[in-house]
Image: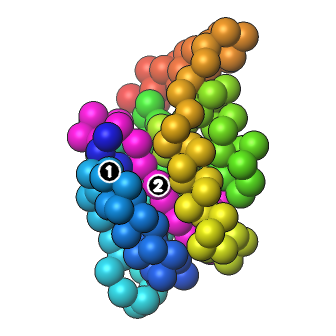
Amino acid sequence: MSIAIGCDEAAFGLKEKIVAYLKDNRYEVEDYGVYDTQPILYPDIAVKVAKAVADGKHERGILICGTGIGMAIAANKVPGIRAAVCHDPYSAERARKSNNAQIMTLGARVIGEELAKQLVSIWLNSEFQGGGSTAKVEKISEYENQFLKCCN
C-alpha cells in the first residue's frame, strides 16, 4: 500500500517517527513535507497530500499538525476526500470502517509517538464495512457533487 504523508513544523518530529514506522512495516511512503521545523502554511501540505490521494497516486494519506484539526479541514476541501481526525483507537477504526476516510489526521500536541503508531496501525488495517454507513457516505458525495456543479 502506498501512503502519502505530510505535516507542519509543529509535527515534524512525529512525522519522521511515523515515516520510519511505516517503512519498517514495509509500506511505500512518499513524504510531502515539511522537512524541517521552519514555519509554513499547513494548508499547502494538506492539499498536496489530499490531491495525490484523490488522483489515485496513493491509497491513503496521513497528515499531522498540532491538533490534526486544521489539516483535516484543509484536506476535506479537495473533492472526493474524506479526512478524519483520529486521537483514539475507536476514532481511528471508525474513520475507515464507517466513514471510508482515505486520510487520517493526527495531532502531535495531542497524542504521543506510541499512541500515534497504534492509531496508524489500526487505521491502515481497517476497511470500509459498508452496511448502514454506505448510504451516509454516498450522501456526503452527493452533496459534494451538488456544490461542485453549482460553483463551477
Of callouts 1 and 2, which one flags the residue occurring earlier in the amino acid sequence? 1
Residue 105: image quadrant is: bottom right
In the rendered image, the vertical position of residue 38 relative to residue 45, given as above or below: below
In the rendered image, the vertical position of residue 150 relative to residue 124, given as above or below: above
- Tell me how the rendering is colored: rainbow
Amino acid of disc 1: Tyr
Between the C-alphas of marks 1 and 2, the distance is 13 Å
Around disc 1, counting alpha carbons within 10 Å, would you say few (fewer than 14), some (14 to 19), or many (20 or more)?
some
The disc label shown at residue 62, or none: 2
Question: Magenta segment range?
Answer: 54-69
Around disc 2, counting alpha carbons within 10 Å, would you say few (fewer than 14), some (14 to 19), or many (20 or more)?
many
Judging depth in this view, the residue of 24 and 61 nearest the camera is 24
The disc label shown at residue 27, or none: 1
- Identify the image quadrant of the N terminus: top left
Q: Secondary structure at mark 1?
A: loop
Q: Position of residue 149 (x, y in %)?
A: 44, 21
Q: Nearer the viewer, mark 1 or mark 2?
A: 1
The answer to if 58 sits in the magenta stretch is yes
- Identify the image quadrant of the C terminus: top left
In the rendered image, the vertical position of residue 9 relative to residue 67, given as above or below: below
Q: Give me the residue at 59% from left, 45% from top.
A: 122
Q: Position of residue 53 (x, y in %)?
A: 34, 41
Q: Give me the residue at 42% from left, 49% from top.
A: 61
Residue 48 visible from this viewpoint:
no
Q: In the rendered view, does 6 fall on the left or right side of 57? A: right
Residue 145 visible from this viewpoint:
yes
